[in-house]
Image (cartoon, rainbow, N blue to C red):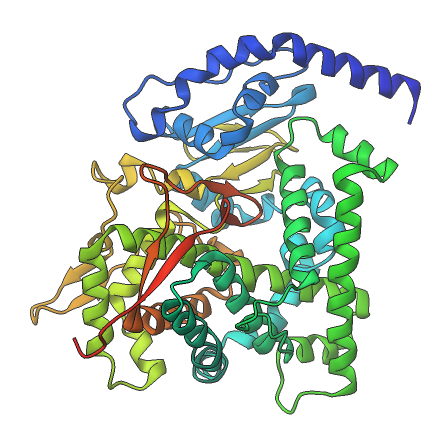
Amino acid sequence: MSLHLLSSFLLLIFSLLVFFRITRTRSSKLKDSSSSPSADVILPKSYPIVGSVFSFLANRNQVVEWLTSILQNVPSATFPLHGLWGQVTILTANPVNVQHILKANFYNYPKGAESQTILSDFLGHGIFNIDGEEWKFQRQISSHEFNTKSLRKFVETVVETELSERLIPVLESAAANKQVLDFQDVLQRFAFDNICKIAFGFDPEYLLPSFPEFKVAQAFDEAVKICSDRFQTALPIVWKIKRLLNIGSEKRLKLAVCEVQEFSKNIIKEKKQNPAESMDLLSRFLSSGQYDDDFVSDIVISFMLAGRDTTSAALTWFFFLISKHPEAEKEILKEIKEKSDTPVYEGIKDMVYTQASLCESMRFYPPVPVDSKLADRDDILPDGTVVKKGMRVAYHPYAMGRMEKLWGKDWSEFKPERWLKKEEDETWSFVGRDAYTYPVFQAGPRICLGKEMAFLQMKRIVSGVLKRFKVVPVLEKGVEPEFVAHLTAKMKGGLSVRIEKRNESK
């Protein structure tokens, strides 16, 4: 590292320390505005060279909420956030802009080199970190895993086995022994077993009554957190220097990634030695002949991230919200009872009130709260926002779920009914929102391949759990769980719950 680079870095740190207190005062007026869209908005103050770094640092512990409060209050739901050295990120919660970015002008907004650099140590060349022809090929192969036959097999074998042989016994034991569980951890274990079994033909046996420690899962969490911190840092040079020197969080990331890669390569080795009778996701990539083991390892890690963290995050917040809304829980229980004599796959497909409740939960707490792209060429968004080549453009599902313009004056209320309509025979039918107003699963060419699989899995877990148990959060009075925006969302500290057995005859 040159002396000039080091001196510039130290000068910048000194400047931040000098101005930090000033900006904290200016930014504090935004902190409570997320619950009141009519509040006066103060846009982040931008300075030469350092942009809005001071405002960012003043709100570094609540970045998602801070940006949401701004997007709720600017007329176009779009604004530029200025970073160091003139870098600009366009943030938007405007569905018209989102459609332009994700569909109409899709090829102008790839993931981009910056994002790929941030995630390359962890996700490498996996499907969620690449663009172009390589992305198309991986997506084409992956798509075969999500046809109707595969989805039915997933629900009727993998999910059903994990539910009946692992999750239900764990909850039975917790109820009998009045044990407090971290339900977020339980759901992550469930989802991790599921994705490994359906995609790789491997059972990690992570959800067992003994709650075994699993070094790979811990390493996975560490890697996700550190990569997320890279995205959210106001000073990217800090993590780059730490990586160069192999110190601190970057040293921990390197160790964590090595642990995860070793695990994924062992899965690949096992698959080669014992090929599956039927094709799973891993078998399809190995048989394609297009990738060596390092590339296939990246693909395995990407699908572990998608299959483990997104559904478990969505379900954690769902069970918390349902516990606060007994009328919605009552409707779900009614629906579960009505479908009790229907074959599992058909039954959960038709659980419209449960699906509406899951959609409403993810409106408030999307598993991926913010996603960004990089402008390949100059552009103008439909609302007139000018985008220059090289600017990062980020759409904000977390903020979009809290926009009065999109959801009405009752946007802050948990109302599954907003996703439903009553038919003449008094039954509910599901009424979805377009993917650009509700981009929880992305939209356009990169829309989530596993969307239907995720809903099937979540609805089966909900029906299997709520039919037998009441999930009661254990929280201090007046304390709300904290939303943590990593690559995928978390509930800070997990969700402590008591499990109470229901009288199933009711």
Determine whether 400 is above or below 162 in the image. Answer: above
Image-based side of 393 in relation to 125, left or right: left
**Residue sitting at x 56%, y 41%:** 372
Residue 457, position as x, y percentages in the image? 43, 70
Q: Confirm whether residue 98 shows in the render.
A: yes
**Residue sitting at x 79%, y 34%:** 240
Determine whether 10 is above or below 293 in the image. Answer: above
Determine whether 94 is above or below 286 in the image. Answer: above
Total count of labels = 0
Task: Report the residue that reaches farthest toward the bottom.
Answer: 277
Image-based side of 345 in relation to 144, left or right: left
Task: Report the residue that reaches farthest toward the right.
Answer: 2
Q: Where, quadrant-wise, is the N terminus in this rendering?
A: top right
Determine whether 289 is above or below 432 in the image. Answer: below
Residue 280, position as x, y percentages in the image? 62, 80
Q: Residue 142: which quarter of the image?
A: bottom right
Q: Nearer the viewer, residue 218 or 152?
A: 218
**Residue sitting at x 36%, y 24%:** 32
Q: Where, quadrant-wise, is the C terminus in this rendering?
A: bottom left
Residue 92, position as x, y percentages in the image? 45, 34
Q: Confirm whether residue 434 shows in the render.
A: no
Residue 368, position as x, y percentages in the image? 50, 49
Q: Nearer the viewer, residue 52 or 325?
A: 325
Q: Residue 136: which quarter of the image?
A: bottom right
